[in-house]
Image (cartoon, rainbow, N blue to C red):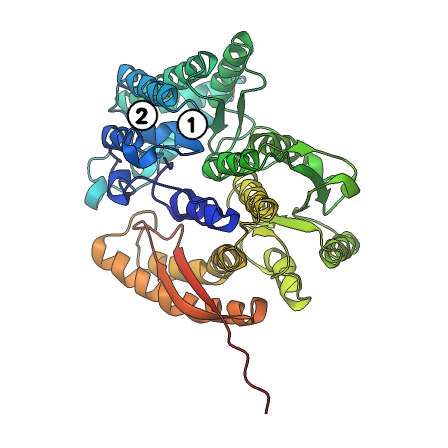
Amino acid sequence: MPLDDRPVTYQLPVMLGAIAGQPVLTPPRALLGNYLTPGNPDAILRWLASPQTQGVSAIVVSTDMLVYGGLVASRIPGVWAIDGFARLRALAAIRAARPAAFVAAFGTIMRLAPTGVPDLGPAKGYYATGATVDALQQYANLPDPPQTPEQRGVATQLRERLGATLQAYLDTRARNLEVDDYALLIAAEGGVDRLVLGQDDAGPTGLHLRDVAELQARARRFGLEERASIEPGADELGMVLLAQAFARNVRWTPAIAVAYSRPDAAAFNDQLEFVPIDTTIGHIIGACGGRRVTVPAQADVLLYVRVPGTSEADERRFEDALAADVAAGRSVAVADLTFLRGEPGPEQRALTDVLIARGLAGRIDAYASWNTNANTVGTALATAIAAGAGRRAGRYDARAHAQFLLDRYIDDYAFHQFVRPVLNTELRARGIDTTLLLPEVASEAAHDNRALLWPLGLDLLAAIYPQYRDAGLTITLPWDRTFETQIDVRLKPRVPLPPA
């Protein structure tokens, strides 16, 4: 049960199953909603309890979809906490009816900013739009409680300005905290085997810290240290828990070693996470069902993590070590976090360019380089574990793996580095807010996106996977905005030309 119908949450988990040779079932897409339209939790619960899911080895559920109808829907008023409790109880009943299945659930601790949209089209009269969203985020980002006279003055001004909207925001946060707290109770009762609560997009200060602390304390009181975790992340959590299921199914506990691009990288902090990246990475390794090792020779997967500000000498050492492990036949996963600082440009492109130029891009097991640290690392690790599980079971699909990685190169690299900036510049020059496009503009933007991204995708295919040919490359904007694209990659092996 995915978080919503975006590619990262709906498409990629299914693609991971294809790599591992472990098919992933999902509800009918029409039940998942789209962007500002919530999914249908009760219909999805009926699907989950139906004969279609009999005999599955694992069930991975987004509690945001289960309770509210998706991530965006979880950030607005509407659903009562008591309805959320009932839906969580329904999940526990399904778990009781599927005693042989490993059941994992993941939820999000509400981020500081509501979904940012302009007051037009389907968002006309929406709970919070435009400058109101910015003001709510400013309030939520203040220390809780405000520490200085200046901070207290800002808080007072914002409370007076926002009025009932601020109270609705705070009530929504309180409702979500109640639901997350109840999910921990369900886990303590055995309603799920594994629970991850990911803190969505929130840094080291703000209203969320009290929520995190309360949930951590409740997890300790319930004795859930081994079965529940509270950590940064959101979009990647479905993939991460599926990776754990894939590994469990082949009785494998992946050993993961981490290699950073500079000596002090472990202390680097994503501004949208409340702990340093090394802490987040440790949580993700655990949620994937893995264990962290410090000796690379003992690792099943070598996770190479590149951060901003790496010196030229450190960069060369990092690239050479990565190349040596690939040459030795090791499983290498690459997480490039340079997007965490600055706009698209040479630093963010450099490692991918090197991977392609040195013939490594098609030989590594995983690649990701977009969104938060947790999103990127979670995507990369889940991919490598899916490949490892497939190999151990004799069900690994090399073409599915190539399709997944080419999707990542086209999306994380080509779209975000070269295409999205162009789309945004052109639309903003016309005074258009790129967070919500009206139908005519969305259609135009989707056309421009395809026209710009298609040749880049074919170039990447030729450079990275010359053994395959394009069997149908579909490019769309899945939501009416420019934040993400969806690429459907279909490859066929090239037939060798007969000798002259």
Q: In the image shown, does 454 or 103 lie closer to the viewer? A: 103
Residue extending farthest to the top is 221
Regarding residue 169, the answer to whether it shows in the image is yes
| Disc 1: which residue | 107
Q: CA distance from mark 1 to mark 2?
A: 10 Å
At x 44%, y 70%, the residue is: 470
Q: Quadrant location of residue 93?
A: top left
> Compared with residue 434, is residue 211 higher up or lower down, i.e. above or below?
above
Q: Residue 305: x percent and y percent?
A: 66, 45
At x 24%, y 43%, the residue is: 30
Q: Residue 242: x percent and y percent?
A: 49, 37
| Disc 2: which residue | 67
Q: Residue 307: x percent and y percent?
A: 66, 46
Q: Amino acid at mark 2?
A: Val
Q: Amino acid at mark 1?
A: Gly
Q: Are marks 1 and 2 in contact (CB under 8 Å)?
A: yes
The N terminus is located in which quarter? top left
Regarding residue 127, the answer to whether it shows in the image is no
